[in-house]
Amino acid sequence: MKWESSLVEHLQWSDTITNRESKEQLARMIAMRVQEGEIIGAGSGSTVYLALLAIAERIRTENLHVTVIPASMEISMECVRLGIPQTTLWMCRPDWTFDGADEVDPDHNLIKGRGGALFKEKLLICSSNRTFILVDESKQVSFLGSRFPVPIEVFPMALPYVEREVLTMGALRTELRLAKGKDGPVITENGNLILDAWFGNIHSSLEKEIKSITGVVENGLFMGYDVEVMVAK
Ligand code: 5RP
């Protein structure tokens, strides 16, 4: 039986989408890769949202059977709105995953997590044999940390301790991420806080060093992951 609520039906993407044309080009490119019967991991963010629209169009016109494992609540709700079946990592392993990124360096190291979904995004990427990272040209940087901080998901009570450790590791500045549309901090889907940390130098072992701090659930550095980066021209 279906709910009579139309809340999800009338969902709209929360923010203005930057570089929309490039992201739509990427969306079409990734939708073309979808094959009948696949289970696909979907990260989070506006590029993923536009890609879902393109995938839904192929599902509709070609009568494809595709199942998505979403990395965030907004992407899950979007799947509901578009009628795309979903599953979880409990049940299935994705055939492949696609996601966006905030920064990509020439070696394909990434910063992700502007949307606060970094933990599940990393879990999906680690669970997949193949991952496509979709970026417009604005995301390409010569070194990580050029534009974005490193987001760190922190168990709430560990916040002061984690901040101290991150500063000791060389962070120049930290900031507790605040919510829009709610007083106080952003609370992740896992009930944690996000500490944004600006580093002058992001070296290859920093991801693991941050992760080793007690109280850190995950961080938005993806150093040396086996990902295929697709760039919109
Ligand atoms: C969310 C992410 C996104 O992939 C990243 O922020 C890119 O977002 P967009 O596609 O909206 O530019 O990591 O946690």
Image: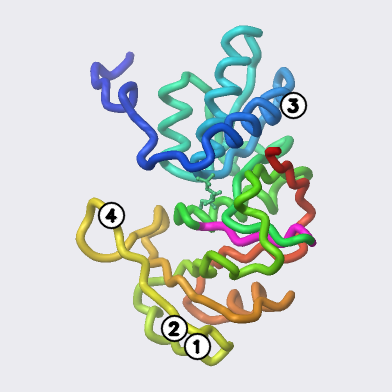
Rendered image quadrant of residue 180: bottom left
Q: Amino acid at mark 1?
A: Leu
Question: Which callout, 4 or 3, points at the residue further toward the start of the chain?
Answer: 3
Residue that mark 1 sits on: 167
Q: CA distance from mark 2 to mark 1?
A: 6 Å
Residue that mark 2 sits on: 163
Q: Residue at position x 76%, y 50% from top?
A: 227
Q: CA distance from mark 2 to mark 4?
A: 22 Å
Q: Nearer the viewer, residue 130 or 232?
A: 232
Say if 227 sits above or below 28 in the image.
Answer: below
Q: Amino acid at mark 3?
A: Arg
Q: Residue at position x 35%, y 77% from top?
A: 157
The percent position of residue 77, horizontal first and vertical second, equals 41, 32
Q: Amino acid at mark 2?
A: Glu
Q: CA distance from mark 4 to mark 1?
A: 26 Å
Total numbered labels:
4
Rendered image quadrant of residue 39: top right
Circles 2 and 1 in contact, beta carbons < 8 Å: yes
Structure colour scheme: rainbow
* Left or right position of 73 against 89: left
Residue that mark 4 sits on: 180
Q: Nearer the viewer, residue 191 or 16?
A: 16
Element assignment for label 1: helix
The percent position of residue 114, horizontal first and vertical second, equals 48, 56
The percent position of residue 19, horizontal first and vertical second, equals 53, 40
Circles 2 and 4 in contact, beta carbons < 8 Å: no
Q: Residue at position x 48%, y 28% from top?
A: 79
* Left or right position of 208 against 150: right
Q: Which quarter of the rendered picture does the C terminus lie within?
A: top right
Q: Provide the residue span drawn in magenta.
A: 107-113
